[in-house]
Amino acid sequence: MASERFTALDVFRGMTICFMIIVNTPGNGLTTYSELQHAHWNGFTPTDLVFPSFLFAVGNALSFVMSRWNNLPTGTVVWKILKRTFIIFLLGYLMYWFPFVKQVAGQWVFAPFSQTRVFGVLQRIALCYGIAALLLYFLKPRITIIISVGLLVLYWVILLLYGQGDPFSMEGNAGILLDKWLLGNDHLYHGEGIAFDPEGLLGTMSAVGNIVGGFVAGSFIQRKGKTYEMLAQLLLAGASLLALAWACNHFFPVNKKLWSSSFVLLTVGLDCIIISAVIYIIDFLHKTKWTYFFEVFGRNPLFIYLLSELGVTLLYVFIVKPKVSLYKWIYDTIYVHAGDYFGSLLFAISVMLVCWIVGYVMDKKKIYVRV
């Protein structure tokens, strides 16, 4: 029973990593299918589900390890949580700093700390994990759920009270104001055209809800067992959250880059439905021939994600022609001939498959990277 449950979890987590690599590594960002792009601001695309699904999977995994923690001294558990939080945050920061040098006027110079991005994907995962794990360890799950709901409401109130102009705009939301005050422009993400970090500090407050949602779902699955009643209730919970997200969208729009409270409700609801489908296919229909592909990703998720990001960074760093990176040269030489959009997708799939091969070799050699 436990192995089947972990198979479903590995598959769900592996699907998340697989699609995360695909959406992060298009051959050409300007010719990417709209479904593989994030919503520009308010709204939702399938791509917007990838990151919150990984947080949901982290919460799911927490529900399995919590029983083991209860047999350990409190100091040991707290140390484990804080150490893992720190390591994941540090890896995320170093990933953005990598390769620690840059070209200026044709010369390689050291990339200074003063111009590095501090927050990001792994950093948000680390902070959300740390907060959620400590809450769930020290408090009853019901109290943690109440606190998580309170954080969703509090986040909405903070944006309303402390935003400038439109409190839900990119330029005027309270999150960007806090990040600029805390870190300054040079430590923020600039991919949106301005200094704005979609993984900033304030949005982490609401993102904790995705991990808590995953924990609740995982605990419910374990408690109810492999029954149709469990599936029906999990699906009902997912549908209810979707309805609540639709209602909240009218006064706090669904927005991935703000990580709005309605976005949390929407993504947790969708993940409840998706993991129900995965469990049904694996544990009820016993169709498992397809699962190993995703299990490879799910067994080494952090390593494979870092491999994809650092590998792509190196492809951008190496210049094969004046102002032409190895990344662009490979796309222009091979993949563009399949068409602008389809070629871009094929490039992303190729990067994903290279990462899968590495993960496959690691799995066969029983090498699993844990932090």
Image: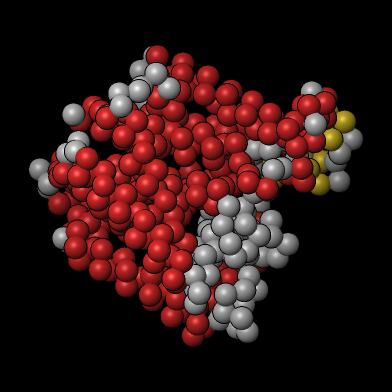
Judge from the rendering whether residue 43 lies leftward or rightward of residue 104; answer left or right: left
- Figure disc tally: 0
Name the image quarter holding residue 345: top right
Q: Residue at x 65, y 38 (%)?
A: 25
The residue nearer to you, when weighing 145 against 86, is 145
Expressed as whole percent of the image width and height from the top left, the position of residue 302 reads 44, 36
Give the quadrant of residue 20.
Answer: top right
Image coords of residue 209 (percent x, y): 36, 60
Residue 270 seen in render: yes
Please tell me whether residue 191 is drawn above or below residue 64 in the rendered image: below
For the residue pair 165 and 75, the one nearer the viewer reads as: 165
User: Could you tell me which residue is drawn at 57 percent across and 47 percent down?
Assistant: 47
Q: Give the colour scheme of this rendering.
A: secondary structure
Q: Give coordinates of residue 97: x percent, y percent.
A: 60, 46
Identify the residue at horizontal 77%, vertical 46% (top origin).
30
Left/right placement of residue 232 relative to residue 253 reads left
Residue reaching furthest to the right: 322
Residue drawn at the location 12% of the way across and 46% of the way down? 70
Q: Quadrant of the N terminus?
A: top left
In this view, 134 is above or below 16: below
For the C terminus, the image quarter is top left
Q: Judge by depth and name the residue closer to the eye, 107 or 208.
A: 208
- Tell whether 260 sits left or right of 150: right
Q: Is residue 317 visible to the viewer in this orientation of the structure?
A: no
Q: Residue furthest left?
A: 71
Above or below, comparing residue 52 to residue 330 in the picture: below
Residue 122 placement (x, y as % from top left): 48, 48
